[in-house]
Image (spheres, rainbow, N blue to C red):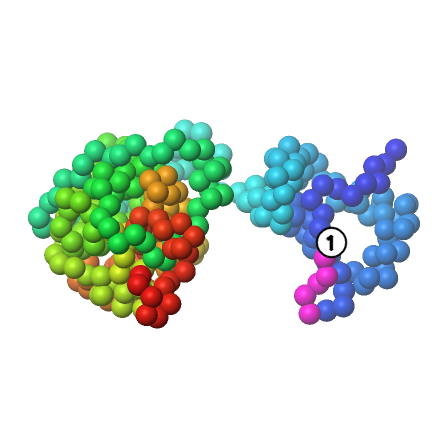
Amino acid sequence: MKDDTWPLGLRIRPAAETSSVEVSDTVTGRRFRWSPEALAGLILDDERRAAWTEGLRDPGSGRDELAGGWRHWQERGWFPSDQYYVASRRWVYADSDDPRGEVRTAALQDYLAASGPPPAEVLPDGPVTELDPPARPADRELADLLTSRRTGRRYRDEPVPSEQLSGVLWHGLTGVRERRERISESDPLSYLDSFGSAWDVHVCVYAVDGVEPGAYRYDLLGHRLIATRPGDHRHAMIDVLQGQRSPSTAAWTIGLVADFPRYQWRYRHEHGLRRLYLESGVLGQELAIVAHAYGLSTLITPAQKDRAYLALHGDLPDDRYAPVYTLTMGRSLGTRGHFLADPGEPA
């Protein structure tokens, strides 16, 4: 007996800019256009519907194998993202079946022969500030931190302990640090671990106990700050952030700056820039959640003047580097910090 139910993965929705209806099969990537009348006729005719859907049941599509993962997404209400999840399982990569790394090794050898190893991270030559051991974050459930965090645009106008700055950088960037530590010339395949490979982290310090105000580069592996431009740069950063006044009461602004050649060597695909934007969101969320665990509020924004930011942080060349995300942090004011003060009101 034929199964006349709809196959897993069909979506029915109005077709854009037409009066027709689109039936899409997200498992195989096939799409069909129907007039509303014709589709209604198919749905109401059991025999025709069973015959049509049977033609979609390709045993080689992997539809049955996707069922468990799909239900996991649907039970959690992750719709319509589940369609993209299924589509991503359909993609076949050159190294999808490469258990011993032979395909990746051959590609890597071509890369090395053509241009040598990936460009190295370049640290500035400036005064070093060793960071204190990270403070222990509050013992709170991750779900509580995720659901209670709110953007903070103004803060308590007082210094933050250096142990908390140390903790935000240490805990918030742990995943990137662990990957960097695994990169080795003796294991060239480690070059291909692209997540986090692009990022240089800069910190503009305004009010941190034991750390002089100024622009710094964060040495990820050494867990220390390297000065690039001493001084109080609150007003300069307000200008960099398109006039947003959060630095006026903040403790620091963290910047995620992409080193394009370092990333492009590893990720040779037209989606590279998109991947960087996604990565900046992942890292920004991790940094903000750690800050929230310390009782800090964060303003996250990509709205910065790129050249002005690069100039402030060591006159970095804009043909290699680009700031993508900034996170301004300070002691939380609770709900009073969600909005900037009105003109004339003390910040």
Segment colored magenta:
12-17
Is disc 1 placed on a helix, strand or loop?
strand
Relative image position of residue 71 (x, y in whole percent): 65, 36
Question: Between residues 201 and 296, which one lies in front from this camera angle?
Answer: 296
Relative image position of residue 115 (x, y in whole percent): 25, 50
Residue identifier under label 1: 12
Q: Vertically, is 334 above or below 307? A: above
Q: Residues within 10 Å of mark 1 (few under 14, many from 20)?
A: some
**Residue drawn where x is 85% and y is 45% of the image:** 51
Work out which quarter of the rendered image holds the N terminus and state it.
top right
Asked whether residue 13 is drawn in magenta, I would say yes
Question: Between residues 295 and 196, which one lies in front from this camera angle?
Answer: 295
**Residue drawn where x is 78% and y is 43% of the image:** 6
**Residue 163 found in image quarter:** top left
Q: Vertically, is 243 above or below 337? A: below
Question: Between residues 112 and 63, which one lies in front from this camera angle?
Answer: 63
Relative image position of residue 287 (x, y in whole percent): 35, 44
Report whether 59 appears left or right of 307: right
Asked whether residue 132 is drawn in magenta, I would say no
Work out which quarter of the rendered image holds the C terminus and state it.
bottom left
Q: How many marks?
A: 1
**Residue 242 found in image quarter:** bottom left
Question: Between residues 11 and 287, which one lies in front from this camera angle?
Answer: 287
Report whether 66 appears left or right of 344: right
Res 185 seen here:
no
**Residue drawn where x is 41% and y is 60% of the image:** 339
Res 346 seen here:
yes
Q: Amino acid at mark 1?
A: Ile
**Residue drawn where x is 68% and y is 65% of the image:** 16
